[in-house]
Image (cartoon, rainbow, N blue to C red):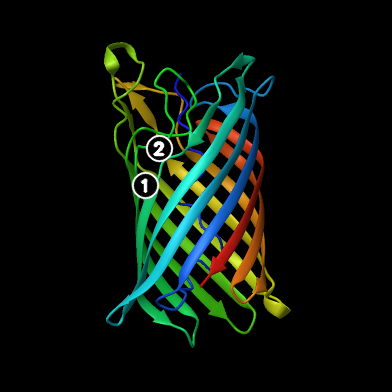
Amino acid sequence: MLVAMQSADAFELEPFEYAPAPPGTTALFDYIVYGDDMSYHPVGGPTYTHDTSLTEAVGITRATQFFALGPLEGLVEVLQPYGALTGAHIGGTSYQDSGGLGDTTLAVALWPYKNPTARTYIGIATYVTLPDGAYNATHAINLGSHRFAYDPELALHQGFGEHWSIDVTGDYILYGNNTNTSAAGGAPLSQHATVQLQGFVNYAWHAGLNTSIGYEGETGGQQYQGGAILSAKTEFQEVRFVTSYPVTPSFQILGELNHQFQAIGGFKQDFGLTLRALYTF
């Protein structure tokens, strides 16, 4: 069995991320991400709940630069996860921990249409994840994936009235092959594309406080090795609750609680917590 894990989903967004900052703005993000997984749901097999767990404790450092290219605005950014996946058990069988640096992600985004008066922003982005994270071919669980990933993304942020807004984002994630595995004959690990959908309904209170309720779902991502179908894929559905507050005009804090109510092909995250600090200058 090979369980493909990533320290954090670089393609997961928070509310208002497609409401752009002015060109020339630099934004620095620091995330703390915690996940408590208590069951494992393989493809086409029984669900494991007894003596089954995984703890995800990771961080992400993210640096973003907003720019203007004539009338077109955009951003470039780099995301670097780090941390550990620990305490992995499936049906009483223990697996090695994995820690260190995760896979680095580079991204560029553009806003082909924006209307600040109507608070309408349409954005497109491309993420490229590099195979440079902590990885051991003999381990079932790894912080890094030892393969490239490519993610084109389309997003909409739309305001309604004085207080309400929505965010909707769609991704089509493509995976390169992992050619460094412990399979007999060195068969590469391959994976079908994943379709990802994220959405938030946001309410802006007084003094800059924002609250959001959101949904994230992924489907597809079936893994193969040497022509054989594996028990792993990337398919889940999740509900998210987010609150953010600007401590100062240039410093914002954000907290998120989330819960996966369905998962196929991997661990199911019963409880997730994300804390984020954002500083702009």
- Upstream in sequence: badge 2 or badge 1: 1
Which residue: 67% across, 57% down?
255
Picture coordinates of residue 135 (x, y %)?
42, 28
Q: Quadrant of residue 162?
A: bottom right
Residue of label 1: 173
Instruction: Pick whichever, 198 or 142, lies toward us.
Output: 142
Instruction: Pick whichever, 212 or 245, lies toward us.
Output: 245
Which residue: 41% across, 48% down?
195
Instruction: Pick whichever, 244 or 157, lies toward us.
Output: 244
Picture coordinates of residue 26 (x, y %)?
46, 69
Picture coordinates of residue 85 (x, y %)?
57, 31
What's the residue type where badge 1 is placed? Ile
What's the residue type where badge 2 is placed? Gly
Picture coordinates of residue 118 (x, y %)?
49, 85
Which residue: 51% across, 62% down?
28
Query: With respect to residue 268, does 17 lie above or below?
Result: below
- Residue 178 visible (yes or no): yes
Query: With respect to residue 38, does 160 lie above or below?
Result: below
Secondary element at image label 1: strand
Residue of label 2: 221
Which residue: 55% across, 60% down?
14
Horizontal side of 216 relative to 132 (left or right) equals: right
Secondary element at image label 2: loop
Residue 202 is labelled as none
Query: With respect to residue 139, does 60 lie above or below?
Result: below
Pointer 1: residues within 10 angstroms few (<14), some, or many (20+)?
Answer: many
Which residue reaches farthest right? 206
Gap in angstroms between the C-alphas marked 2 and 1: 9 Å
Horizontal side of 102 relative to 253 (left or right) equals: left
Which residue reaches farthest front? 281
